[in-house]
Image (cartoon, rainbow, N blue to C red):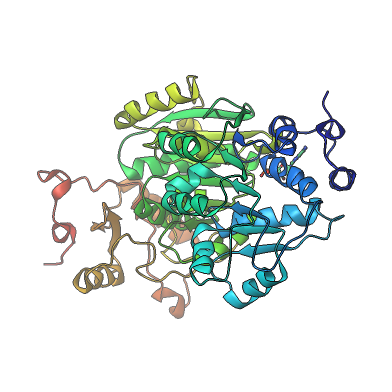
Amino acid sequence: MTTFADLGLSPKVLDAVEAAGYTIPTPIQAGAIPHALQRKDVLGIAQTGTGKTASFVLPMLTLLEQGRARARMPRTLILEPTRELAAQVEENFVKYGKNHRLNVALLIGGVSFDDQLRKLERGADVLIATPGRLLDHFERGKLLLSAVDILVIDEADRMLDMGFIPDIERICKLIPFTRQTLFFSATMPPEITKLTEQFLHSPVRIEVAKAATTAKTVEQKLVKSGKKDWEKRAILRDLIRAEADGLKNAIIFCNRKKDVSELFRSLVKHEFDAGALHGDMDQRARTTMLANFKDNKLKILVASDVAARGLDIPDVSHVFNFDVPIHSEDYVHRIGRTGRAGRSGKAFTLVTQADVKYLSSIEKLIGEDISWYDGDLSTLPVSSEPDEAPRRGRGGRDKPAPKRRRNEGRERERPQSEIDIIAAAEKSKDIEVEVQDDQPVIHTAEKPNKAAIKAENEQRRARPAPARSERTEPRRDHRRDRDDMGTAPIGFGDEIPAFMLIDTKI
Ligand code: AMP
């Protein structure tokens, strides 16, 4: 069996690896490190969680032991799609570079230029940057890329998703042709292949898993669902409950930003400990949300693909696909959030009839059929519990719900007239407003059935009369959860005008 000592790394690096507690290199490390040390270009096709960061950090540290940096002329450059990933790579340099005295500079957005300039002035051995901020510095004339000897492009397919490819092409052209390039991507869509053909020189290709395969440690299941969002939400809740204590933490992926907001709101209403992450949130909100999730202060994160891909999300026990992803590569990325570094994980995908074509392209991509969930959710004791929803804005069981501005997370700004309709309707005790397809849909309270009235009356008789002040609380006992009732319009299809659903007293 290959050990780290067999890979040609320097004694200082081997010592740091041992101190980190690693003895056996992962496949991407065993494959990439010897070639990187021989100054060859490397094309590494590996998912996150495979140990790929160390596969470029360790040889870089060894190679950087010769030579020293000059002011404003970094010796090596690592491009990362997001600030969080850039910061994570920096942490790797701290961990594995503990025996080295290297200057590592981080050029990311949201941090003052001055501090970054000071680091550049001192001469950076390693420059870790997001493409935008790097080009900002370059355009201000504060940075020369002519001494870059090693270029690392990490998470190339995420860069593609985030629209960074033109920036990457520009940066590649600013760096000497004679550089060594280490290039990593989890998947190889045609745009990425083109990029590697343009900028890598006879690379050694190391593929630790087939391009776009899911980790073997992830148990994947498909779950049949009706096409209505409320049906999907009900199934999702049952699935989460069915997993019970086995669910340590979970990410739920939606295809659209507005569904992220909707689902998040619905889960909170149902007392799940949930937060949301989507591209319209500002960086600070994203960072806070992510920090809470990482610190286990938040159990469930509802996310869109772009937000989730742009951030480094830790290992989770469960991934739920609220929607089947339209791009099959996204499935691999989503599933890759669980079952990392050999740990086991579960991934459930809700499938409606309309999703079948997307599903078959996913199965084609990953080269296997995903089995159907055979658990009977309808027999769960929790399914039959009355789904009495707490009022909007009330918190989950364990913690208060995050305060949300009325418009937060919506895909478009609502005109004031619409906001007023929603606000007025929400004030009414008999009306709740749901947003469907980005339109407000107003639900009236359901008429209680006879059995429920009887049970309620009996309960009331058994209860002491509430104090006067308590009586001001609106009663909701007979209201069925709006998530669980369709709009059930007759004669209008889905186009029923919202005002026709308002109960009016004559
Ligand atoms: P990465 O794919 O670089 O995000 O790494 C995933 C996780 O694997 C990180 O927590 C690393 O610390 C860990 N790791 C890296 N190399 C090894 C190794 N050789 N053995 C065990 N764990 C490792």
Q: Where is 140 relative to 310, above or below?
A: below
Residue 317 pos. (x, y %): 62, 41
* Residue placed most toward the observer, 90 or 355: 90
Which residue sits at x=58%, y=72%?
Answer: 111
Residue 359 pos. (x, y %): 39, 27
Which residue sits at x=68%, y=44%?
Answer: 53
Q: Where is 324 relative to 475, above or below?
A: above
Residue 230 pos. (x, y %): 34, 45
In what quadrant does ligand 1 lie? top right
From this viewpoint, is residue 381 visible? no
* Residue placed most toward the observer, 105 or 430: 105
Which residue sits at x=62%, y=52%?
Answer: 78
From this viewpoint, is residue 95 visible? yes
Residue 239 pos. (x, y %): 50, 38
- Residue 398 figure quarter: bottom right
Q: In which quarter of the image is the N terminus?
A: top right
Task: Please give left or right for residue 471 compared with residue 444 in the image.
Answer: right
